[in-house]
Image (cartoon, grey):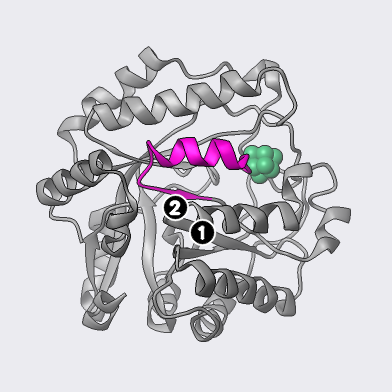
Amino acid sequence: MPINNCRLVTYSPAYTIVPTYECFNRCSYCNFRSEPDKSPWMSISDARSILKPLQSEKVCEILILSGEVHPHSPRREAWFRRIYDLCKLALSMGFLPHTNVGPLSFDEMQKLKGVNVSMGLMLEQLTPTLLNSVHRHAPSKLPEARLQQLQWAGELQIPFTTGLLLGIGETSDDWWETLEAISNLHQRYHHIQETILQPHSPGNQQTFDAPPFNPHQLPEVIAQARKILPPDITIQIPPNLVKDDLWLLACIEAGAGDLGGIGPKDEVNPDYPHIQEQALREILQPAGWELVPRSPVYPQFDSWLSGELQTAVKRSRNAMLLV
Ligand code: SF4
């Protein structure tokens, strides 16, 4: 994005709602999932109560993040309907929904496009070797199924966020291969707005016994990713997973232009509290970087949205002075 030439770093003022933590996958590094009988689904009235006080706060994006119900489960339709209704509710209350709920059918994606300004799915890593380790019990992590999602998002003209999870048993060559796959799909559809580089950061719930991804390696991965990805894809890093201020600045100097959604809780990494906006400014400003809020859809994708969504985005950008 050209804004990065002006030493601007973006973030999205966000709040995450979780329709359910239940998930039929068992990724061994997961710190999010619950067993199906341990996670009642969020009701629409509970969601309304959560969202109401946020209307007077500086929140723009509602990230809808969910564990997955199996595509062949008789409960899948109700799960999907709840996600759809939560998006509609968020929109009706003046927020901009961004859904990331695992692989969807083409039809499900198409329906969610109507109530989301952007959507996301981590590619994580394309190497099939992980199917014998961290993804042994995670059918949703089939690399070709996830690539297919990115392709469908392109076909449907859905502004999309994807990313890599670093340090789960892959090699450095695997990173470049995954980044090249993202780059190739983007050159075909021009729909990837951000690629997240997320360092594995061990949490209390996971069974995967491995050290955290070395944050000192992150700047060089970002620099190489910057060379592989087209310039109109922004690189995003989660600042709460790059503990050291100097390394956070090194990541930004290396080409990370966005810090993602900042809200009260990182649901995927609950052991790593988000650094809030003011604290981030205090790290960035002395080094000459300005932190600016952005919308969950980048302006170049506005024309892909329905008239109703475009109006919602315009209202939100004006009210919150978003880029
Ligand atoms: S990482 Fe995602 S897909 Fe894997 S078990 Fe956790 S919630 Fe499910």
Verify whether residue 113 appears in magenta: yes
Direction from residue 31 to residue 94 in the image, left or right:
left
Mark 1 burial class by Cα count in 10 Å: few <14, some 14-19, many 20+: some
Closer to the camera, 257 or 263? Answer: 257
Give the residue number, with chain letter if any, for mark 2.
158
Quarter of image, ligand 1:
top right
Depicted 171 relative to depicted 318: above or below: below
Q: Residue at x 25, y 41 (%)?
A: 59
**Disc 2 within 8 angstroms of ligand 1 (CB):** no
The percent coordinates of residue 49 (x first, y second) are 30, 18
Residue 154's disc is 1
Residue 321's disc is none
Res 31 visible? no
Depicted 285 relative to depicted 52: above or below: below
Query: Which region is colored magenta?
Result: 101-120
The percent coordinates of residue 296 (x first, y second) are 33, 52
Q: Residue at x 79, y 43 (%)?
A: 139
SS at mark 1 in the image: helix
**Marks 2/1: CA–CA distance:** 6 Å
